[in-house]
Image (cartoon, rainbow, N blue to C red):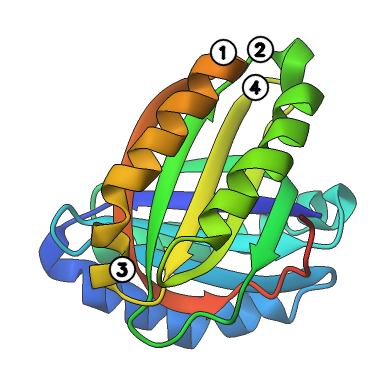
Amino acid sequence: MYARTTTVHGDPTRVDDGIAHVRDRVMPAVMDMDGCVGLSMLADRESGRCIVTAAWTDEQAMRASADGVKTMREQAREIMGGEMEVHEYEIAVMHRRHEAPEGACTRVIWSRADTGQIDRVLDAYRMTMVPQFDELPGFCSVSLMIDRETGRAASAVTFDDRASMEASREDAMRMRDTFVSAMEVTITDVAEFDLVLAHLRVPEMA
């Protein structure tokens, strides 16, 4: 399965307008496209950074949707203001303990790995990181998306609520440090968001 992420670095005062636009206009249109599995949206109301992710059954479906989503993507950027960036990934891991409740929050970790070591890193992630996430209080789900050509990856760990996410920070940092040291992975960014739309619907892939 594949995913396209659209990140808008927008005006914090316009984030709720952006959420309403994605919920009421973008999500129904995208989910009606051939091969679309679902859509989610993360929002940081303090910084104005929002991430919309659409999942697709295969790379062909994702590519075929490109022209159809351009106008909607630009409308969302105009509503929220700021700059926009788009990335496409293979969905390599998806594990859920349960569906995310209202009020769920997500920590996203961006990283890079040697492109020749991708499969080794993925195997280690599945065997070591996923079971550890499963033991964290308030854990809902984890996904890992990878761009095999560049080695860029994005991992999203979702918790029942903000308190659970905040309480996990120390353990999560320790887990990350151990993993990236062993796998020679470089963390490029870490950010925390409200999960404002949770309709990705990607099946278990752990």
Question: Which callout, 4 or 2, points at the residue further toward the start of the chain?
Answer: 2
Residue occupying the point 31% across, 72% down: 18
**How far apart are the alpha carbons under marks 3 and 2?**
32 Å
Q: Tell me the residue that label 1 is attached to.
A: 184
Tell me where residue 97 sits by quadrant: bottom right
- Which amino acid lies under the numbered mark 3 shown in the image of this protein? Ser
Quarter containing the C terminus: bottom right
In the image shown, does 18 or 93 lie closer to the viewer? 93
In what element is the residue under mark 1?
A: loop
Residue under label 3, please give it: 164
Closest to the camera, between mark 3 and mark 2, is 3
Residue with the mark numbered 2? 114
- Of tags 1 and 2, the one toward the viewer is 1
Q: Residue at x 64, y 40 (%)?
A: 128
What is the distance, in whole Å, between disc 4 and disc 3 at their CAs? 30 Å
Few, some or many residues within 10 Å of mark 4 (<14, 14–19, 20+)? some
Q: Position of residue 175 (x, y in %)?
A: 45, 37
Calculate the distance from the C-alpha at mark 4 to the C-alpha at mark 2.
6 Å
Vertical relation: 126 (above or below) 50? above
| Residue at x 65%, y 44% (from the top left corner) | 145
Q: Is residue 140 above or below residue 108?
A: below
Q: Nearer the viewer, mark 1 or mark 4?
A: 1
* C-alpha distance separating marks 1 and 3: 29 Å
Residue 200: percent from the left, percent from the top? 63, 72
What amino acid type should be assigned to the residue bearing mark 1? Glu
- Amino acid type at circle 2 is Asp
Position of 181 with respect to 92 (left or right) is left
Instruction: Locate residue 35, reporting x and y percent.
Output: 84, 68
Decide: marks 1, 2 in contact (CB < 8 A)?
yes
